[in-house]
Amino acid sequence: MIFYLYILQSLKDNNIYIGITSNLEERLKRHNAGYERATKGRIPFKLIHSESFANRIEARNKEKYLKSGFGREMIRKLLLQ
């Protein structure tokens, strides 16, 4: 099964959300419909980045890195270019 790491940007406040899923299209729909508690107050979202991984462990490791201080700084630099 393929897993996806994704980065969403809120069109409401420009904050980002980082997550993983096995169904990227459905997950984005759920975020924008307000079904996800963590992002409910910041809808709508646009997908700004995604990566595919062969397994959940690899996707989770990348998610952990991007949620760290270094990873978030890297994301911000990419967004400003």
Image (spheres, rainbow, N blue to C red):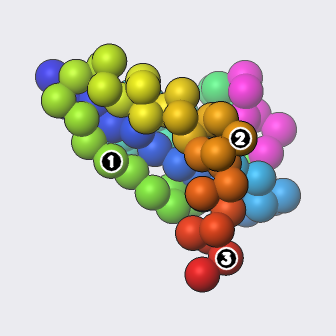
Identify which residue, 20 or 73, lies in the foreground.
73
Mark closer to the chain start, 1 or 3: 1
Label 1: how many residues lie within 10 Å, few (<14), some (14-19) or many (20+)?
few
State how far apart marks 2 and 1 are (Cα).
20 Å
Q: What element carries label 1?
A: strand
Mark closer to the chain start, 2 or 1: 1
Identify the image quadrant of residue 14. bottom right
**Location of the N terminus (image quadrant):** top left
Identify the image quadrant of residue 57. top left
The residue to which callout 2 is attached is 69
Mark closer to the chain start, 2 or 3: 2
Region rendered in magenta:
37-42
Foreground mark, 2 or 3?
A: 2
Classify 65 as above or below 15: above
Q: Residue furthest top?
A: 57
Q: What element carries label 2?
A: helix
Q: What residue type is labelled 1?
A: Glu
The residue to which callout 3 is attached is 80
Classify 1 as above or below 33: above
State how far apart marks 2 and 3 are (Cα).
17 Å
The residue to which callout 1 is attached is 51
